[in-house]
Image (cartoon, rainbow, N blue to C red):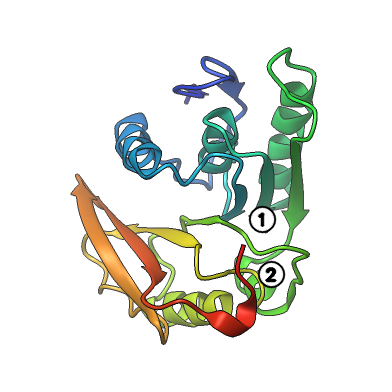
């Protein structure tokens, strides 16, 4: 399956995809998600966390459209190695700018969300788990992200699920602000419902 960056500074760059085991977001869904995010302006200079990164397509698209930092978390060693290859190629691309950074963390998304520390919170979090990922696990993952320094009162979380899966529960003081369905895929946008004063503003 050939996948490319749709728009932005790395438009047209090919993404190396594993032969099997990942379920990449379709270009149509990806385009819809990013048009939505672009209209909010949340990607400009953003710090982005891509959980269950798979091919890295979502995080790399965000970098292409103005984000300055990406941490892609993927538990499969072959998939993580392919993302690392793609990021190395991007860093040699003439559109790569000084001050940008991107790295892969080989880890389970749940473990990263519950134990990783962040120097600064992420502005944007993509969560695209396998469709078989249980709703309870999803809710725990969201709660872990929301309760730690990985997020702030400005963070937007985008979660992809199957339209047949139960809807996720937003963590305390967060709310699902939008849901959009694209074929089999349901996309949820989850944001803090009130400013979180003790986690630091930026």
Q: Residue placed at 76% from the left, 39% from the top?
A: 101
Q: Residue placed at 52% from the left, 30% from the top?
A: 65
Residue with the mark numbered 2: 112
Label pair 2/1, CB-CB below 8 angstroms = yes
Residue with the mark numbered 1: 73
Q: Residues within 10 Å of mark 1 (few under 14, many from 20)?
A: many
Q: How many marks?
A: 2
Q: Is residue 90 above or below residue 182?
A: above
Rendered location of residue 130, percent (x, y): 45, 59
Q: Observer-nearest residue: 41 or 84? A: 41
Q: Quadrant of the C terminus?
A: bottom right
Rendered location of residue 16, percent (x, y): 62, 28
Q: Residue placed at 32% from the left, 42% from the top?
A: 36
Q: Which mark is residue 32?
A: none
Q: Residues within 10 Å of mark 2 (few under 14, many from 20)?
A: some
Res 147 visible: no
Q: Earlier in the sequence, mark 2 or mark 1?
A: 1
Q: In which quarter of the view is residue 159 placed? A: bottom left
Q: In which quarter of the view is residue 198 placed? A: bottom right
Q: Is residue 181 above or below residue 87?
A: below
Rendered location of residue 11, percent (x, y): 52, 17
SS at circle 2: helix
Rendered location of residue 173, percent (x, y): 40, 84
Q: Is residue 26 above or below residue 69?
A: above
Q: Is residue 63 above or below residue 192?
A: above
Q: Is residue 118 left or right of residue 147?
A: right
SS at circle 1: strand
Q: Residue placed at 72% from the left, 24% from the top?
A: 90
Q: In which quarter of the view is residue 69 placed? A: top right
Marks 2/1: CA–CA distance: 8 Å
Q: Observer-nearest residue: 167 or 117? A: 117
């Amino acid at each position: 399956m050939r996948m490319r960056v749709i728009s932005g500074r790395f438009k047209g760059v090919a993404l190396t995809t594993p032969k099997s085991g990942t379920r990449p977001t379709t270009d149509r869904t990806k385009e819809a998600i990013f048009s939505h995010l672009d209209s909010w302006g949340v990607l400009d200079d953003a710090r982005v966390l891509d959980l269950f990164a798979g091919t890295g397509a979502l995080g790399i698209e965000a970098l292409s459209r103005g984000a300055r930092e990406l941490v892609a978390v993927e538990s499969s060693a072959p998939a993580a190695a392919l993302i690392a290859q793609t990021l190395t190629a991007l860093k040699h691309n003439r559109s790569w700018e000084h001050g940008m950074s991107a790295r892969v963390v080989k880890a389970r998304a749940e473990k990263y969300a519950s134990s990783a520390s962040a120097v600064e919170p992420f502005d944007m979090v993509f969560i695209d788990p396998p469709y078989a990922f249980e709703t309870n696990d999803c809710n725990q993952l969201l709660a872990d992200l929301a309760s730690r320094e990985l997020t702030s009162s400005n963070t937007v979380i985008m979660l992809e699920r199957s339209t047949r899966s139960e809807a996720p529960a937003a963590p305390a003081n967060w709310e699902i602000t939008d849901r959009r369905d694209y074929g089999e895929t349901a996309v949820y946008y989850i944001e803090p419902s009130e400013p979180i004063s003790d986690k630091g503003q930026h």
